[in-house]
Image (cartoon, rainbow, N blue to C red):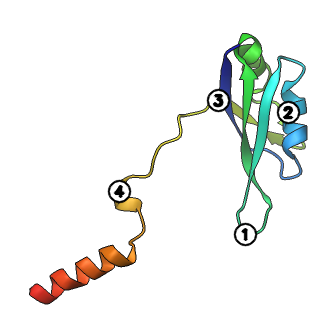
Amino acid sequence: MSVTKFFVGNLPFSIDDRALANLFAPFCSVESAKVIRHRETGKSRGFGFVELDTDGAEAARKNLNGTEIEGRLIVVDTAKEERQPSRAHKPRTKDRNRRHNAHDDEL
């Protein structure tokens, strides 16, 4: 069985993983459903991801995209592949700081 991953945006903040899975269950088999939460507060960030059996995934997307849930029109779209952060966005380690500072001394 192949799986399709969807991004689900503009979710009401009351929606949890189970409720997200239940939205898609009438259309196809739900492999996983995850509402993304703020790291520090644990509150919903208003979006999530679902993994569905590919056979019914497109029907689920067409039927649910733009659906109003608790006064919010949800967005269902194909999830983009997760990207690795570029080197420019990696935080400096102590070693990198030390090398950087040593270089400054040479100037």
Q: Report the residue at 31% width, 73% height from top.
A: 96
Please tell me which residue lies in front, 95 or 10: 95
Please tell me which residue lies in front, 57 or 13: 57
Tag 3 or tag 1, which sits nearer the N-term? 1
> Residue 79's image quarter?
top right
Q: Secondary structure beneath disc 1? A: loop
Which mark is drawn over residue 40? 1
Q: Report the residue at 72% width, 69% height from top.
A: 40
Amino acid on which the number 2 mark rests in the picture: Ala
Please tell me which residue lies in front, 88 or 75: 88
Give the x, y percent position of residue 57: 73, 18
Tag 3 or tag 2, which sits nearer the N-term? 2
Farthest bottom residue in view? 105
Give the x, y percent position of residue 60: 78, 20
Residue bearing mark 2: 21
Question: What is the spatial separation of the Cα atoms under label 1 and label 2, in whole angstroms?
Answer: 24 Å
Amino acid on which the number 1 mark rests in the picture: Glu
Tag 2 or tag 1, which sits nearer the N-term? 2
> Residue 66's image quarter?
top right
Q: Secondary structure beneath disc 3? A: strand
Q: Residues within 10 Å of mark 2 (few under 14, many from 20)?
A: many
Give the x, y percent position of residue 104: 17, 84
Residue bearing mark 4: 87
Amino acid on which the number 3 mark rests in the picture: Asp
Question: What is the spatial separation of the Cα atoms under label 1 and label 3, in whole angstroms?
Answer: 27 Å
Question: What is the spatial separation of the Cα atoms under label 4 and label 1, in whole angstroms?
Answer: 25 Å
Residue bearing mark 3: 77
Q: Is residue 59 visible?
A: yes
How many dots with numbers?
Answer: 4
Farthest front residue in view? 95
